[in-house]
Amino acid sequence: MSTTTHTSPVGAPPDPSRRKFLKDSAMTAGAFLLAIHVPFTGNSTDDPVPQGVYDPNVFLKISADDTVTIINKHLEMGEGTSTGEATLLIEELGADWSKVRFELAPGDAKLYSNLLFGIQGTGGSTAMAESWVQMRKAGAAARMMFAKAAAAKWNVSASEITVENSVVKHAKSGHHATLGELAGAAMTQPVPADVPLKSSDKWTLIGTKVPRLDSKSKTTGKAIFALDVRRPGMLTAVVKRAPQFGGKVASFDASDAKKIKGVVDVVQIPSGIAVLAADTWTAMQGRDAVKVKWDTSAAEMRSTGEIFDEYRKLAATPGLPADKRGDAAAGLTRSAKTVEAEFVFPYLAHAPMEPMNGTIELRSDGAEIWSGSQIQTIDQMVAAQILGLKPDQVKINTLLAGGSFGRRACPVADWTAELAHIAKAINGRAPVHVVWTREDDIQGGFYRPQVLHRVKAGVDDKGNIAGWQHKVVSQSIFIGTGMEGMAVKDGVDHSMVEGIVDTPYALNNLAVEVHNAKSPVPVLWFRSVGHTHTAYVMESMIDDLARAGGKDPVALRLELLSQQPRDAAVVKMAAEKAGWNSPMEKGRGRGLAYHPSFDSRVAMVAEVTVKGSDFKVDRIIAAVDCGVAINPDVIKAQIEGAIGFALSTVFRNQITFNKGVVEQGNFDDYEPTRIHEMPKVEVHIVKSSERPSGIGEPGLPPLAPAIGNAIFAATGKRLRTLPFDLTKPA
């Protein structure tokens, strides 16, 4: 069995009314389908995931040939969730890892809900945190059912039966059988209500470097991504969108496009003009031939500099209060030294290797979608609303995704909406595959917001931070979306100030204000969301204040974290592993940054070499505390990947506008990090028995400030604008 899904959909898991039928079918076919109903305890120490009833949850299939297939409820977009979830379940089941495969779960929130979201979706670095107990209980329940089936067959006590390396064994009698041989009998056993889990000293997989389940198929090219889907009679569609965000179609002429051989149809949809053709290249040629007059009356027509000018005007006025501790103004008046700074961050494109795409088929009874869907519930609801269907009439087959970094988790499901609109416009007469080109993605997608920070902070005559005033100007990611209610309070979008208002540093006199800037430019969370910019500001300011107060930057951080032992331990580990106090030769600098996010703690030390206006990142030393390290190799890979991803935002990446038109278009002018630019990376993992926390995003925030602090150490020049430009004055 392949380790990936195929273009044929994964079969829908059973509902309760069908369970007996599937039991009988499983007995006949020799397959084992485990439907679990494991209520959570709600114990805040061991299991803080919200309680919920999931009956049935189908996570496991075992075939007669002993192949074990995990139904992975989280999207696999390169971050390793497929291996992580399987590790948890197989740890308890006792299967042979070499026989383990995975499939991606179809869209079904009743069965595959993210327990921290309440809907089906992957994001926020929650996959392992929310699966930690659920997947282990699924595996443990399966193991108990096999033990009971074997006990009944061999007339022995189930408590004396073990399952190891896919063999069910009773040592005293010598009886043994494989999981595949017992699958049918095990299915007749009731799902146990009480499911004890193994103690950590019994783990054989958790905490080890088990091989990733998706590596081989991706390496050999056998893995099926959404872009690989081909359906009988399928048409490929590309969309001509307005050059300025907020622009709309006033009129269009498709006569030249329809003359191109292979172009089948041209239709108008809300986002622009869709050209359908026999293949992608022909559709692109047809799109180029379409003549469109755009209504730009509500479009963004400003250039980047003009937008920042407005941000500066807003920052000069009182904003919405986001946090207030003590009296920041009074603290500043008592300060012996103050630091005032403005920090500027550009729009950023996610630019995943596989651009947005998906396939849809309309049928008389509903619709079927093939997609690298990250939030299946939203995609289902949006498609259903457009097509006049109920959400459960929209079937989503989840396929591998070639990266996301937040882009595929769009709260308005933009490319899924295009799928539905185009299919509706042609009355569903053919399957439709919507494809975004690289230029479409970079020039017409959603972006990490452009942000401006203004900070004034001071230290007293003992070098202690006396006061900190902080203003943030940015577009809100959540205001105006269906998620506003959960993320916005009193007009303040928490994602704009995360990493500031929840800093672990003991800042006793802190005042934070925000301004919600307005623009038609669509914005979206980016890998680590608000932490992408707040970490840079916080860690640059901490460094400046340490020097203003005559303190070592690491020493000041440890003082501010004296009541936060887990945080302090990570800072200490990074500094020690980097040889913090060892001398650096002229032209080289060492800088540290610490920033917790997604309930994980990451500190990084950067070593750089600066020659004139050029700099090279030589080495990054990272210390990580993400709770129990389910797979240290995946954790290391995620930190390394985050560093590679974030380096491009330090070196050069930015989305800029010229009279509302995006100036970048492809990897030639929005260039990702190149292999020769990667520094030596060391990742050190803190041993922990705490519940696992996020790792997909926390490796990004500390990188830029660590590099910025290292450049300052080498040159005395403080960089407050990303990407870095050493030719400009500080």
Image (tube, helix red, strand yellow):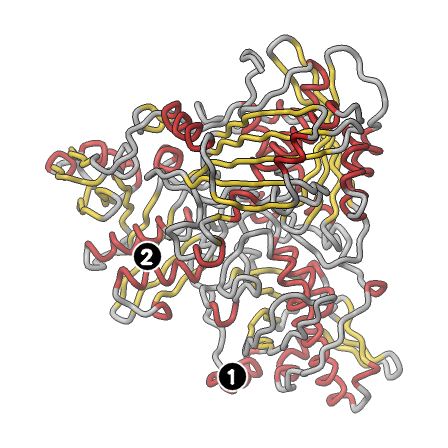
The structure residue drawn at horizontal position 29% and vertical position 46%, both measured from the top left corner, is 236
Q: Earlier in the sequence, mark 1 or mark 2?
A: 1
Quadrant of the rendered structure where residue 64 is?
Answer: bottom right
The quarter of the picture where the N terminus appears is bottom right
Q: Distance between the residues labelled 1 and 2?
A: 29 Å
Q: Contact, CB < 8 Å: mark 1 with mark 2?
A: no
- Find disc 2 in the rendering and name its residue: 360
Quadrant of the rendered structure where residue 145 is?
Answer: bottom right
Please give left or right for residue 205 compared with residue 31 in the image.
Answer: right
- Specify the farthest residue to the top: 612
Q: Disc 1 residue type? A: Arg
Please give left or right for residue 421 compared with residue 222 in the image.
Answer: left
The quarter of the picture where the C terminus appears is top right
**Can residue 166 be spotted in the picture?**
yes
Q: Disc 2 residue type? A: Ile
The structure residue drawn at horizontal position 83% and vertical position 65%, both measured from the top left corner, is 202
Task: Give neighbour class at mark 1: few <14, some 14-19, many 20+ (Cα, 10 Å).
Answer: some
Dot 1 lies on which element?
helix
Task: Give neighbour class at mark 2: few <14, some 14-19, many 20+ (Cα, 10 Å).
Answer: many
Dot 2 lies on which element?
strand
In the image, residue 516 above or below residue 2: above
- Residue 93, x across and y down, in percent: 71, 70
The structure residue drawn at horizontal position 58% and vertical position 33%, both measured from the top left corner, is 646
- Residue 342, x across and y down, in percent: 54, 26
- Residue 121, x across and y down, in percent: 50, 58
Quadrant of the rendered structure where residue 706 is?
Answer: top right
Viewer-nearest residue: 287 or 460: 460
Labelled disc at residue 19:
1
**Can residue 402 be spotted in the picture?**
no
The structure residue drawn at horizontal position 53% and vertical position 36%, both measured from the top left corner, is 471
